[in-house]
Image (tube, grey):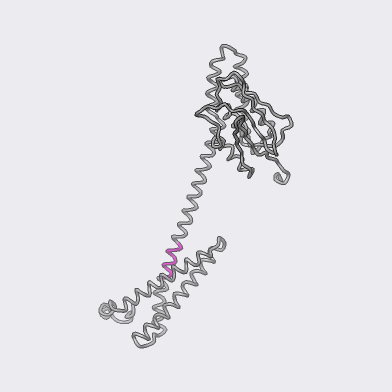
C-alpha cells in the first residue's frame, strides 16, 4: 500500500517489511475505534429517527477514522521516512481505510438489523403460541369434557328409572352449555347472571354421584365478573369434596369490603385439594380487568375465596 505508485517488483520486495506492520496496526486501531464508537452510540440509541441516527453515526465514525489515518500517516512519514506525505497519498490511504471502516459499519448494522428483525419475529411467534394455548385452554373450559361425560353417564343410569328427571337434567345441561358457548365471548357479566348458572350447575351435580350442594346468597348482589369464573370455582369446589357424606355442603356467597366472598366448610379429597394453582384460569381472567388478586384463605372451620367485584363506568364505555 505504501508503494502503491511503484511497480510490482518493488511491492513484493518491500511491502513485507515494516510497512505491512504499520498497515496492520493502523487497520486494528481503526477497527477498535469503530467498535468502541458503536458501543458508545448504543447507550444513547432511541427508537425514533433510526435512519437519521444511523447516518449520523456513520459520518462521525468515518470522519474520526479519517482524522486517525491522516495523523498516523503524517507521523509515520515524517518520523520514519523523513518527509511529509502529499495530498494524493493521504487521499489514497484515507480512501482505503475509509472503505474498510464503511464495510465494518455496514456489516455491524446489517447484523444488528437482522438480530432485531429475528427477535421481533420470535417475540411474535411466542405471543402467537401463548394466544393459541390460551384459546385452547379457554375452549376446553367451554366444552368441559369432564362434565359432559359425567352428565351422559348419569343420563344413561336414570333415563329408564326417572325419565322426567333425565329430561330436567338434559335441559339444565343444555342451558349451561349454551351459556358457556355464547357468553364466554363477552368480557364481563353481572354477578346475578353468573349465579343463576351456578344454581343450574349445582342441580346438575346434585343429580350425579357427588356430595349434594346448597348455595345461599344475598339477593342484592351487584357487580360484574368474567363469564364462567364463578362456574369454574364452584365446579372445582364440588369436585374436590368427598361425596360420600349424607349432609349437604353449604356454600355462601356474600360481600366483604367490596369483594365477592365465597365461603364453605371443606371436606376435601386427599389427592384433589382446592389450591391457588387450581384457580389459575380465573386468576388470569381477572388480571385483564383488575390489579386486585384473588385470595384463597383456609382456616380450621372454613375455606374462603375472595374475588374482586368489578364495576363498569361511563368513561370506560366512552
Q: Residue at x 34, y 77 (%)?
A: 22
The picture quadrant where one finds residue 4 is bottom left
Task: Give the image location of residue 185, x and y in percent.
Answer: 61, 36
Position of residue 193 relative to residue 82, above or below, is above
Question: Is 104 colored magenta in this rendering?
Answer: yes
The picture quadrant where one finds residue 226 is top right
On the rendered structure, is 196 left or right of 41? right
Farthest bottom residue in view: 83
Task: Give the image location of residue 155, x and y in percent.
Answer: 56, 18
Of the pair 245 and 55, the residue shown nearer to us:
245
Q: Residue at x 50, y 50 (%)?
A: 123
On the rendered structure, is 124 left or right of 234? left
Question: Is 99 colored magenta in this rendering?
Answer: no
Q: Residue at x 70, y 45 (%)?
A: 316
Farthest front residue in view: 300
Look at the image and tell me whether residue 180 can be seen: no
Q: Which residues are magenta?
A: 101-109
Task: Give the image location of residue 39, x and y in percent.
Answer: 47, 66
On the rendered structure, is 275 left or right of 78? right
Position of residue 182 relative to residue 57, above or below, is above
Of the pair 225 and 21, the residue shown nearer to us:
225
Amino acid at each position: 500500500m505504501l508503494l502503491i505508485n511503484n511497480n510490482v517488483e518493488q511491492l513484493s520486495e518491500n511491502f513485507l517489511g515494516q510497512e505491512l506492520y504499520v498497515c496492520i496496526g493502523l487497520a486494528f486501531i481503526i477497527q477498535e475505534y469503530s467498535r468502541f464508537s458503536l458501543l458508545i452510540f448504543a447507550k444513547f440509541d432511541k427508537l425514533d429517527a433510526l435512519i437519521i441516527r444511523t447516518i449520523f453515526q456513520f459520518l462521525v465514525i468515518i470522519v474520526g477514522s479519517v482524522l486517525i489515518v491522516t495523523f498516523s500517516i503524517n507521523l509515520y512519514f515524517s518520523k520514519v521516512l523523513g518527509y511529509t506525505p502529499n495530498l494524493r497519498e493521504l487521499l489514497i490511504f484515507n480512501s482505503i481505510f475509509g472503505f474498510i471502516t464503511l464495510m465494518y459499519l455496514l456489516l455491524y448494522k446489517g447484523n444488528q438489523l437482522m438480530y432485531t428483525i429475528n427477535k421481533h419475529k420470535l417475540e411474535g411467534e411466542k405471543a402467537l403460541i401463548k394466544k393459541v394455548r390460551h384459546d385452547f385452554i379457554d375452549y376446553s373450559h367451554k366444552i368441559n369434557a369432564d362434565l359432559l361425560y359425567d352428565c351422559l353417564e348419569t343420563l344413561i343410569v336414570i333415563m329408564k328409572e326417572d325419565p322426567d328427571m333425565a329430561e330436567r337434567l338434559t335441559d339444565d345441561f343444555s342451558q349451561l352449555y349454551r351459556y358457556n358457548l355464547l357468553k364466554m365471548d363477552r368480557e364481563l357479566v353481572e354477578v346475578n347472571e353468573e349465579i343463576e348458572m351456578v344454581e343450574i350447575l349445582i342441580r346438575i351435580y346434585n343429580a350425579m354421584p357427588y356430595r349434594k350442594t346448597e348455595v345461599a346468597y344475598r339477593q342484592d348482589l351487584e357487580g360484574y365478573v368474567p363469564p364462567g369464573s364463578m362456574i369454574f370455582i364452584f365446579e372445582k369446589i364440588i369436585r374436590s369434596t368427598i361425596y360420600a357424606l349424607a349432609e349437604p355442603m353449604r356454600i355462601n356467597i356474600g360481600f366483604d369490603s367490596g369483594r365477592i366472598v365465597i365461603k364453605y366448610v371443606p371436606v376435601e379429597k386427599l389427592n384433589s385439594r382446592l389450591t391457588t394453582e387450581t384457580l389459575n384460569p380465573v386468576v388470569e381472567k381477572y388480571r385483564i380487568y383488575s390489579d386486585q388478586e384473588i385470595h384463597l384463605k383456609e382456616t380450621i372451620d372454613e375455606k374462603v375465596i375472595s374475588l374482586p367485584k368489578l364495576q363498569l363506568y361511563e368513561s370506560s364505555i366512552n
